[in-house]
Amino acid sequence: MMPNQSSFGSLPTFAVEHDHFQILQSAARFREYLLEAINNATSRIYLVTLYLEDDEAGREILTAVYEAKQRNPKLDIVICVDWHRAQRGLIGAESTKGNAGLYQAYADKYAESVPVYGIPVRKREVFGVLHLKGFVIDDTVIYSGASLNNVYLHYGDRYRFDRYHVIQNMPLADSMVDFIQNDMISHPAVHDLSKAGLPTTKELKSDIRKFRIALSRSFYQGEAQQVDENHVAVTPLVGVGRRNNMLNKQILALLTNATEEIILCTPYFNLPKSVLREVKRAIKRGVKVDIVVGDKTANDFYIAPDKPFKAIGGLPYLYEINLRKFSVVNEKYIATGQLSVHLWKHDANSYHLKGLWVDRSTMLLTGNNVNPRAWSLDLENGLLISDPNKLLEAKFNEEFENIFKHTQRISTCSQLETLQDYPSRIQRLLKKVIRTRADRLLKRIL
């Protein structure tokens, strides 16, 4: 299903040859491809990510970008990261300058500098971050939910599994670059983190408020191209907040209009009420629904019982409680196979997949976690792919075979642990959270 006309105007549709669409199957291959693309860039490099970390993989990417700039000073290079996330350390770590210190050190080291723009979606990180996805290198869009650090790029023993799609199409690449230039980095609220003497968030308070209002009215530009039977249609979508959020509307529309099959990927089982309602309706009208979610031990917040305890480690258990409740309510559909819940787990690695595949003819690639935070707080985007002739079906089948390789289907809710099965410190924490109803707030903002 393609998007309707919105109050923002006409959304662009780009005709993409199916041979110009490829899917990478691993974090390691994603890292290799990204580095190759950066090294071979001839005109532009635009990287938009939640964070580019000060670790081995992050520095490898930043070094590659800087060396490309030194070789070709005319390269148009822009990096965008979240303003707040870039200026703090990891959760629970000591206070530091954050990743911004790395960006400033690189700018001081090299003759040709590269701007790293901090995007402040809200005045506080907890109430909204830059969750926009998509790298543009020359005329190629590399779309993934992954950020840039060791675990996302499988630099070392562990990886965080995501989805990795490569689309070669100049008009689509131009549209995504235009959005970055005109709707993001040109705004007074946005500043280059590679420079010293940055303003404080408090000083930017008024600009940030205006920026969020502007973002809520923005959309990707471009013509609505004619799409013939030999092409697939790709429409980029963007949304922030609940009002007039075209991305949210399209997720609901895809679920509402499904007639045969839905495959939904989400790293955290914490669906917005409106999404949960449409999933239940789809099941009741006979649509086969597959939900692929990470096992609690594959959650990026999971902390093994033998490691030092932190309160944030309770989140994976809270998400499992959500999943168990959902499974209990829908156990008759699980028993018949009309609803299948697949838990992903592979050694000590983590799971970060998102997206929808509906009736094997429409795919939404997105960084949206399909949770209340993504639904109302963060700046999100996605690529809606209409493929009525199923030109990409074989490629998506191969991708999902790779995803399902490390999943276990839940045949009964008894396969999921209960509160009484959890480590004692987690039990005490969750009992307190549930008793004070703090879980309702946590589910909205985390």
Image (cartoon, grey):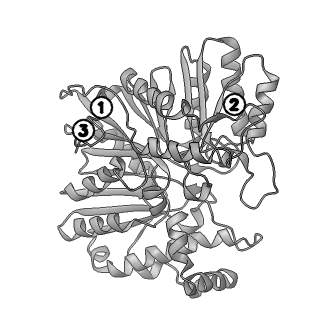
Residue 84, image x and y in percent?
Answer: 66, 48
- State the count of labels: 3
Instruction: Give me the disc on residue 146.
Output: none
Q: CA distance from mark 2 to mark 3?
A: 36 Å
Q: Marks 2 and 3: CB-CB under 8 Å?
A: no
Q: Which residue is mark 2?
A: 62
3 or 1: mark nearer the eye: 1
> Which of the two labelled residues, at mark 2 and mark 3, occupies the earlier sequence position?
2
Q: At 77% from the left edge and 36% from the top edge, which residue is drawn?
A: 102
In the image, residue 428 sits, relative to residue 58, either above or below, namely below
Q: At 68% from the left edge and 49% from the top edge, which residue is drawn?
A: 202
In the image, residue 89 sits, relative to residue 13, either above or below, namely below
Q: Which residue is mark 1?
A: 12
Instruction: Give me the disc on residue 387.
Output: 3
Quadrant in which the C terminus is drawn: bottom right
Residue 442, image x and y in percent?
Answer: 55, 70
Residue 258, image x and y in percent?
Answer: 21, 56
Judge left or right: residue 102 versus residue 65: right
> In the rendered image, is residue 419 in sight?
yes
Disc 3 residue type? Answer: Asp
2 or 3: mark nearer the eye: 2
Dot 2 lies on which element? helix
Q: Kindly indicate the quadrant of the structure image that contains residue 150.
A: top right
